[in-house]
């Protein structure tokens, strides 16, 4: 309800004491004044175009409808002065606290959500854009929070992802794995599992595979028994230390690590054995049990026990130590058995009826080319490492032994 001249006068004088109030977080305020940026009325603005578009003879109809006109070129300011004023703002120059997503804390068996931090980090490009927009429109107040001039956390307490992540974390730490090792066990629960969990910036839960593998390796160091020194009571009544060999328990660390990660993801509460590369027959005592082959290299003699009963025994010929072909000592196991085999090596090729390897190409077999066994034959006419036995002895062992049965080789 103003004349063109009156409206022009009001708008022109509006900027005399103009200032833009910046409302910041924590109730702080700053100002950019028209004087700071050399704000001026634009004499070449487009108000006259609006005036010319109006038709006085239509004034009656205009009473019954609203008409709005928007002018964006009322004022001019000095660009460099404005940039200088913006760069001096305290909200830009104060110590910046970056926004932080919600976080998660493990306590008393469950995870709690720690509230997000909004911080005070300004998005300078956005702030400059909003300041310029408000000055051009003649606005006197700019709320930086409402106009999204701050960097905000991506995930807050009320985010759906926050709820999902918390539930997933609690599912993982509800896992309880009881590992059985004979009469001993190891219990894995949330008080350790939580140390393997990491929540990334997208609130995805990451299980630290290296930490899981380290745990499994620790189980291996504690419970693997391959190559251990074993006290063994010989058939002659002596107690000997059998050092080394390939027999014993050995955890398959790669497969068990993978399985454990899956157990955690499922939140399993289970009792199990770890996945083994190989197993011994027992976890008790020296783990040998009462079915085994005993090879006494010193006495050149072999015994075979099955379920504690002596099945077969006899003199043998082992590897020639004077040619560097000694039969290995230690606790091993039968790899497999083969009825009829051709053994080929450096300078020899022989056929045997019963082939029972326990260490690479070293094994027990019949030797029909020998007329005698035992004594000190092995020192001059010994084998390339195999254990030669008479045909009857090889046959009896072959018919009663299975893969995995311990083979104990020792010297007194």
Image (cartoon, grey):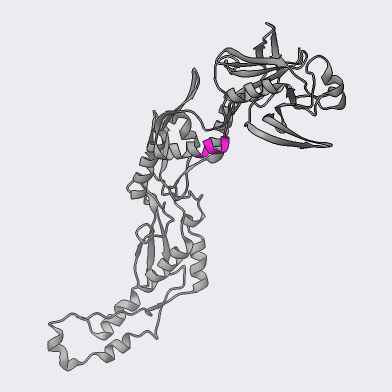
Q: Pick whichever, 367 or 186, lies toward us.
A: 367
Residue at 48% in and 39% down = 261
Residue at 51% in and 60% down = 88
State the residue lying farthest toward the bottom: 57
The magenta stretch spans residue 254: yes
Left or right, residue 156 beside residue 288: left
Residue at 35% in and 41% down = 167
Q: Pick whichever, 144 or 335, lies toward us.
A: 335
The spot of residue 182 in percent (x, y) is 50, 20
Left or right, residue 2 beside residue 324: left
The C terminus lies in quadrant: top right
The N terminus lies in quadrant: bottom left
Q: Pick whichever, 157 or 43, lies toward us.
A: 157
State the image quarter where residue 39 is shown.
bottom left
State the image quarter where residue 191 is shown.
top left
Q: Is residue 282 above or below residue 252?
A: above
The spot of residue 220 in percent (x, y) is 58, 28
The spot of residue 36 in percent (x, y) is 46, 67
Q: Is residue 331 visible?
A: no
Left or right, residue 37 beside residue 68: right
Please state the total of marks drawn on the protein image.
0
What secondary structure is the magenta-colored segment mainly?
A: helix
State the image quarter where residue 352 is shown.
top right
Left or right, residue 130 beside residue 259: left
Q: Which residues are magenta?
A: 252-258
Q: Is residue 203 visible?
A: yes
The magenta stretch spans residue 105: no
The spot of residue 50 in percent (x, y) is 29, 87
Q: Is residue 160 above or below residue 81?
A: above
Residue at 58% in and 27% down = 402
């Amino acid at each position: 309800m103003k004349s063109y001249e009156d409206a022009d006068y009001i708008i022109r004088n509006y900027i005399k004491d103009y200032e833009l109030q910046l409302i910041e977080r924590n109730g702080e305020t700053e100002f950019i004044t028209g004087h700071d940026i050399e704000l001026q009325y634009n004499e070449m603005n487009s108000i006259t175009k609006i005036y010319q578009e109006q038709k006085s003879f239509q004034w009656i109809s205009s009473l019954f409808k609203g008409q709005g006109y928007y002018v964006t070129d009322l004022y001019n300011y000095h660009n460099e002065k404005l940039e200088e004023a913006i760069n001096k703002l305290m909200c830009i120059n104060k110590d910046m606290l970056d926004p932080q997503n919600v976080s998660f804390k493990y306590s008393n068996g469950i995870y709690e959500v720690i509230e997000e931090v909004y911080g005070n980090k300004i998005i300078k490009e956005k702030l400059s854009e909003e300041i310029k927009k408000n000055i051009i429109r003649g606005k006197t107040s700019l709320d930086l929070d409402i106009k999204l001039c701050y960097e905000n956390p991506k995930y807050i307490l009320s985010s759906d992802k926050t709820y999902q992540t918390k539930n997933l974390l609690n599912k993982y730490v509800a896992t309880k794995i009881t590992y059985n090792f004979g009469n001993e066990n190891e219990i894995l629960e949330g008080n350790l599992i939580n140390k393997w969990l990491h929540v990334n910036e997208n609130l995805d839960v990451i299980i630290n595979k290296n930490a899981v593998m380290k745990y499994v390796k620790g189980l291996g160091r504690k419970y693997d028994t391959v190559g251990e020194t074993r006290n063994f009571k010989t058939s002659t009544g002596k107690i000997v230390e059998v050092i080394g060999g390939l027999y014993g328990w050995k955890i398959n660390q790669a497969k068990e690590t993978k399985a454990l990660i899956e157990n955690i993801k499922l939140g399993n509460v289970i009792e199990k054995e770890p996945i083994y590369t190989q197993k011994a027959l027992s976890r008790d005592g020296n783990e040998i049990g009462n079915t085994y082959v005993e090879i006494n290299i010193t006495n050149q003699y072999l015994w075979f026990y099955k379920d504690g009963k002596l099945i077969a025994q006899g003199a043998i010929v082992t590897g020639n130590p004077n040619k560097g072909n000694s039969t290995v000592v230690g606790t091993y196991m039968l790899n497999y058995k083969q009825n009829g085999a051709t053994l080929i090596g450096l300078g020899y090729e022989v056929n045997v009826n019963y082939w029972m390897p326990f260490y690479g190409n070293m094994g027990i077999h019949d030797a029909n080319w020998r007329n005698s066994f035992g004594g000190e034959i092995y020192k001059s006419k010994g084998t390339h490492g195999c254990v030669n036995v008479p045909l009857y002895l090889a046959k009896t062992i072959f018919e009663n032994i299975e893969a995995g049965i311990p083979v104990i080789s020792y010297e007194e």
